[in-house]
Image: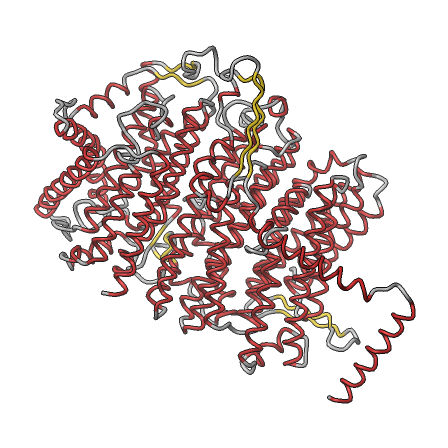
Amino acid sequence: MTAALTNSVLQLVLLLLVSPLVSGVIKTLKARLQTRRGPGVLQSYRDIFKLLRKGMVIPETASWIFSATPYVFFGTATLVGLMIPMTTTHAPLSLFGGVLAVVYLLALGRFFLALGGLDTGSSFGGLGSSREMTVSAIAEPAMMLAIFTVAVGANSTNLSEMAKIAVSQSWRFLAPSQMLAFAALFIVLIAETGRIPVDNPATHLELTMIHEAMVLEYSGPYLALMEWGAAIKQLVLMTLLVNIFFPFGLSADWSPHAVMVGLAFYLAKIFLLGCLVVLVETTNAKLRFFRVPELLMVAFILGALALISTFLF
Amino acid sequence: MFSLAAAFVLSLAAYAAGAFASLVSWRKPALARRICCGTALAGGALGGLAAVLGILSDTPVRWSVSSGIPLFAYSFSYDALGGFFNLALAILVFAVSIYSFGYLKEFEGKRNLGVFGFLFHLLLLSLTIVFTAANAFLFLIAWEVMALAAYGLVTFYHEDRETRRAGLLYIIMAHIDSGCLLLGFALLIHASGSAEFASFRPIALQLTGAQQTAAFVLFFLGFGIKAGVIPFHIWLPAAHPVAPSNVSALLSGIVIKTGIYGMARIFLDSLGGVPSWAGLLVLIVGVISAVLGVLYALMEHDLKRLLAYHSIENIGIILIGLGAALIFRVAGHPQLAAVALIAAMFHTLNHAIFKCLLFLGAGSVQHSTRTRNMEELGGLIRPMPVTAFCFLVGAIAISGLPPLNGFVSEWLTYQSLLAGYGAVGGLKRILFPLAGSMLALTGALAAACFVKAFAITFLALPRGAESRDAHEAPRSMLIGMGWLTAACVALGLGVTWFLPTFNALTGQLLGTQVVASLVTGHGLVLSAGGRTAGTVSTALIAAGFLTLVLPAVLLVSLSTRRFGRKRGPVWDCGLPGLSEENEYTATAFSKALRMIFSVLYKPRREIQAVFDVSPYFPKEIHFESGIEPTFEKRLYAPLQEFLFRVSARMRTIQAGSIHAYLAYIFVTLILLLLFAVHK
């Protein structure tokens, strides 16, 4: 009980502290690859800190939904972060729900995010909400197929159980089904975290923005929660991807040594996945919005192939 | 101490008394309204009591009174399955009758409340009998009365042409379904020699393959039309929105569920299982209904039509669970079948509750603004805060989002599909994960649709005079909605306490009780069976969420106390002021999906602009957009044309001459005699 509590608190701290760093590292790496200096890896911390010390402007047209949204978005992302295995195979709150609860809790956050975008009456918010819900709707079947592929391997939707199975067969990621499922989930990760080629996190141009359009009217501490929540959500999805497919370094117990090793491995894996995201972002142009479904269709087909190959091999 | 029989008979008596008392007092509208709602409330409470007693009692309670007519008897059987549907009915009747106290007030002096009350109570009476009848003919009579009462209520605003057309379509489809059921029962009665439901089970195994197929097809058609599965759905989005909203809530909430009840009763109880291909068919039809239902819902901007299409979607989700249960049963996995059946039945109850809630919410909106068109609404969260809150809870529940009840039943459905992949052999197991991914698509699209429905109706600025002058609904209507809102939350968070109700149901239909294996973790956690299987706990999720959000709230409030918080105008790109014309509309919101699924929708649009001087500054723009009603145009229009052609041919024998008709009668008589002698 106490061990579980310590682990929850540790993971919570890790989640809150590392997530802005990951965003910062991705931003800086991207800048370097484009031969710019970039803002520095700590910029996300500075942003959040600065926003927390700013006054807040609430649109006159907004209702209580607008104010509830940052909390729901931040709360669901953080809660989900405690339901996934990070440095050990045990997710602290694995009893709360498995991978399906994770997906649906993130959907709850998105539901409120879209409502918050529409609540102000600004066209930008509506535009962002419409696009966000569309992209996520098309990404969802691909995600579920890939998840089912992994889940039938583990015969469970419990993430701790999935991680344990992955650890027990640590070279399993070389199996065709796992590779295909990874590819499908990687595309979904790009779409869900709003990265090029689906969305451009650096833009504020109405023709292209999705996530930024929804949070356009937020300011001060609410915006800080939104940005922090988005960073946590990104870390959660990346963690899910690396720990299910590449379970290296995941320890089975809570001993300090194992946790340290697990942490080192974990950070290295996240860094590598971040590099992959940066590579994709730098070498691709943003897709026209109506070409995004084609990309997600590719993810769906990859997921279907992954499933069929579990059947064949 | 109340006995089950007393509560059941008294609830029937309350409905019957309500029907006649309303009719008799039609000249005094205020009295008729109070009688109608009061007796319904009493009947609902007694029906609920009977349902609870029925579910708690281990053995089914049977009554039978012979009628003197061969094959027909007044046989009732109050068992777990019927009790469960009666429970759902009672929960809805309780809400709707309280709601109607306020809602029907505007009918006074304008509409005949006596007739309304009569039809309303007739509907409730026939529904109760449908769920408890144990004789095929009693069932069919109740079924027919239900269809006719519903027809009367659907066409209650009969001066509207649209309403009359919808009613006609409904009554035609309802009779096709009654016809199919009649044939299906005829087949079973022919085989067993009795019309009692209990007599079907022993002979079910002796049916030949062709008979089994025929029985399945006839019952699936009959119950499928009533449930509104695609492609037999066209009447549903036409008929449900035009009825008064308290009736729409019952129609979508429970009347279409009689189709689900019938399938569970006949396929699982009477026939004791159907062939494997039939289970697969139910699953596939479920998937198609779910996906197409939500896709069509997305294109609607009539609030009640949108909800009607979502009923089709949710019937699809229920059929996914039911289909899985049928497949597992044949494959010899009663435990898995029980989980899938619980998923289907729990979703039936959940959908009944949140769809009723949403229709009542839409009714409040219409009551206050006189319009169902979302494009004219907006900003209603300020004048109607309670309605908005209730609608939001319903929207979250129907989108299958945690921690509410819709999430739990969808989660159980996913778990059954996942288990199906391991349990069923051969290539067809691929269907289960594919169905799972389509369920995910459905869930995400439903979320998109309810973001649209809630945000366009209740958020931002009012789009028309109607919504600017809106007012909150009367208290009775709010209480009715509040009761269902509480039910959504209670069934979501307290699911582990509610699940044991299903033990009797799965015990009766599948001979196995699995709830003990579904609940772990000190009764807080739902598990898909087994220690390592997936788990979920909505109560813990809610508690964990609140624990995590609390510090965030503290942080923000500390910050705003120090650095201030003020209201300001929305960014309007430097133009003078934001108006409702700048707002996103429902059509605009679904534009992206309309483009992506254009193969399916075949959207058309027409723009006519009138120019004054320059082609850059139009004086007037007329914009029209719509989608092709594929099923109506491609399937039903040719069918209708074919029927008309055949009828035109038939007209030649309908000469109108009495001699010709006498000759026909004579020839028919001879043929029948020959047939009898030959036999």
Report the front residue among A39 and B29: A39
x and y percent of residue B416 in the render?
39, 60
x and y percent of residue B148 in the render?
73, 55
Q: Residue at x 26, y 37 (%)?
A: A234
Q: Residue at x 67, y 74 (%)?
A: B186
x and y percent of residue A3 in the render?
19, 47
Asked if residue B13 lies left or right of residue B335, the reply is right
- Vertical order, A241 against B65 (above or below): above
- Quarter of the figure with the C terminus of chain A: bottom left
Asked if residue A221 lies left or right of residue B206, the reply is left
User: Is there any visible trace of residue B24 in the rendered image?
Assistant: yes
Q: Residue at x 16, y 25 (%)?
A: A42
- Vertical order, B27 against B580 (above or below): below
Which quadrant of the figure has residue B484?
top right
x and y percent of residue B223 in the render?
60, 62
Which quadrant of the figure has residue B131?
bottom right
- Vertical order, B531 against B396 (above or below): below
Report the front residue among B134 and A214: A214
